[in-house]
Amino acid sequence: MMSLVPREDGSNTTILPTPYVFRPSGQWDGNDGKWSTFVINIGDIKAEGRGQNFRTLISTSSSLTQVPLQADWCGDAECAKSRGVEVFDSRQSLGLKTEPVNGFTRNGLFNLPTPFWWPGNEQINASYGRANVGLGPSSSDSEVLPDQEVAGVANDQFFMGSFGLAIAPVDFGGGPRSTFLETYRQNDRIPSMSYGYTAGARYRNNNQGALGSLVLGGYDASRMTGGISVPMVGRHNHTLLVSVQAVEYTPSPSVEANSESISLEEPPFAAAIDSTLPYLWLPGHICDEFEKKFQLTYNDEDNIYTVNASDYNYNRQQNATVTFKLSTTDWDRNTYTTISLPFSAFDLELGYPIVPNSENATKYFPIRKSKNGMFVLGRAFLQEAYIVVDYERLNFTIAPALFPDSQEKAQIIPIYDSKSQPKLVEPPSTPPNSDGSGGLPPGAVAGVVVGIVLFFVLLALGGFLYWRRRRARQPTPEDKLSNHDIDTTKAGEQIRQRRVSELDSEPPTSPKPSFAGYYNNGEGKDITMFPPINEMESPPAVSELYSPPPPESYTATPSSERAGADYFVVGGKIRRRGATRDSSTGGTPGTPIAELPGDSALTSKIDEMLSEKKTPQDAVRSEKEDTPPATLESRTEDTQAQNLAQGQTRPHSQLERQPSHSRGLSDTTIQSESTAVSQPSPEELQAWERERGEPRRPLSE
């Protein structure tokens, strides 16, 4: 039922109900085949289970509810039962009871509306009245609508009763009256004027049968697959019209692999889908092709195709399939669906009163030649097709039917009113937490999980974009150099290293520096840090001088007491000892280095200092002021002097001819460390005084 709940803004919103699943009776009825029927009840006044029950067929073109009346040609209980009339008041009823006591109000006799494609000229009368109509067997739980139009029919052409699903209004005087489906929607029993239906198939599921399916206000998705949506003819013409593009005949693959066209090259034709009767009214040339393929016998008087025993066996052996290619319109051949009917769908029987003897059923093929140019795909076609009709939007869907096992759960899909904004609320079958489980429904849980996953995905994406943006902003080392961003605190060291490397004088045979092992090429060969350049050569060997041994007075002095061992006395003159290069081995004496040019200037400076009687300290200070920055050799001498001052002894090397050498670091390379000559010791000063009067002699003597 409809209920109203307040919105937050104070207005009301309609809560729509769920679709109604109309359960089939579970029986197969009819005198033109065996069809799945549905039970309705008539005349239950107070919903006390006092209505008459009828098994009826479904009519997609009629808007009436019609049931059998008692007829002269069907006056026994068996005949009435075969027409779908059920027991009432504990005995078999023969038809609709039209007395007011049974809840029926008569309106009179009127013509029964027939489909527009109806070929006969005979008028069929019916007894009309108003009564309560309920869905399913009469009970207190039955869905009952009051004051509905009901027609009682006694004509043998309408052997079974039918439940109409159309919405065209009925007018028998006093104004048009709403149909059952429309009233059902107006009473908010279903969400919209729509339904889903398939007739069912007795031959399916290993001949156990697949019952029909009818859902009011929706459809069962488990009973269909694919399909096309087709617009209705118009607002006041609700005919379910499709375009038949082609009809093909395909024998069993075990017999023949090729298909043949039954429609030949004829143009498409429009056909109405209608479940009122089982027949397929088709063009004459297509019926002729059916007759050839299935070896049918045509009865022109009754316009019926029958099948004898031999033809029936032949068709069973061929086991052919007839396929209908359907489209929305004659000119739209790209949007289509195919409905395939096996031979079993055409394997039907005619019974009494169509044939005189009810004991001799006749097999027939449910096709007929159209006499008026109107073509119909009847109930036999809907054995293999599922239709979804939506009167709200004036369209319908036609799709191949599915036949799931009876134990498979239906998938009911509601169809809502196009003018409403539905909010579907179903009362819980059990109170909240009644089973002790509590929690949210599965749909809500799935929504929460999806939301959480989406949040973390977006968070990760945002973090990645932020990292990428920051990384793009940070300058690379190349960018820093290109912008002249030089570290001034390290510039001097960089320049110094470069200048030292440019003047590196290390010969190939000289000892490796202590850090050379870090740059090892993996073959046991050290790689120097800086590539050597051409060295400056010493004067030719012929010009090199020999140093005579020092006088006994000097050599007698212990080495530990000679702090100024960088100078030696020759002929009363002080001479500077050549610098020595330390060997790579710890115990090898240093190699003497030849006296460098410029020593004569140093000697003259000392002579001048002595002549002026300056103290050694003054001479040292004067030497610091006048001499250029110390060379690598002078720094080496200072290191040796410091070692001697700390008590380390330096072995004397033999005075010999000094070999030519490669000069070390340039005197002008390192200006930050200016080193003067070593300060003479007191013994050397005494020796200088003794030798003041002696003449100098060349060192080469």
Image: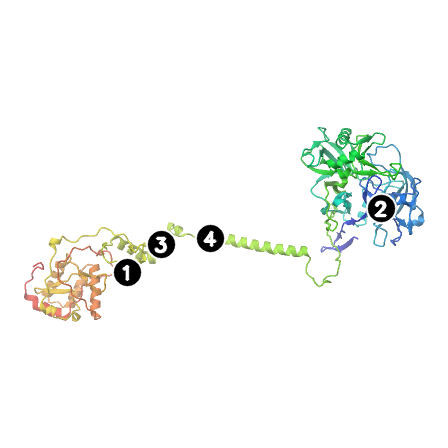
Residue 453 appears at what percent x and percent y?
A: 59, 55
The percent position of residue 476, horizontal first and vertical second, equals 41, 52
Front label number (1 vs 2): 2
Residue 486 is labelled as: 3
The amino acid type found where label 2 is placed reads Arg
Can residue 630 be seen in the rendering of this structure?
no
The quadrant where residue 512 appears: bottom left
Q: How is the image coloured?
A: rainbow
For the residues labelled 4 and 2, the Cα–Cα distance comes to 78 Å
Q: Residues within 10 Å of mark 2 (few under 14, many from 20)?
A: many
**Callout 3–callout 4 Cβ contact below 8 Å:** no
In the foreground, 599 or 394: 394
Q: Are marks 4 and 1 in contact (CB under 8 Å)?
A: no
Q: What type is the residue that disc 3 sits on?
A: Ile
Whether pointer 1 and pointer 2 mark residues with C-beta atoms closer than 8 Å, the reply is: no
Circle 2 sits in a helix, a strand or a loop, which is it?
Answer: strand
Report, in whole angstroms, how far the alpha carbon at label 1 lies from the one at label 2.
Answer: 111 Å
Distance, label 2 to label 3, CA atoms, is 100 Å
Residues at marks 4 and 2 touching, judged by CB atoms closer than 8 Å: no
* Residue holding disc 1: 514
Query: Pointer 4: what residue?
Result: 471
Tell me the crowding category of disc 1: few under 14, some 14 to 19, or many 20 or more residues within 10 angstroms, Cα based: few
Report helix, strand or loop for mark 1.
loop
Circle on res. 55? 2
Residue type at mark 4: give it: Arg
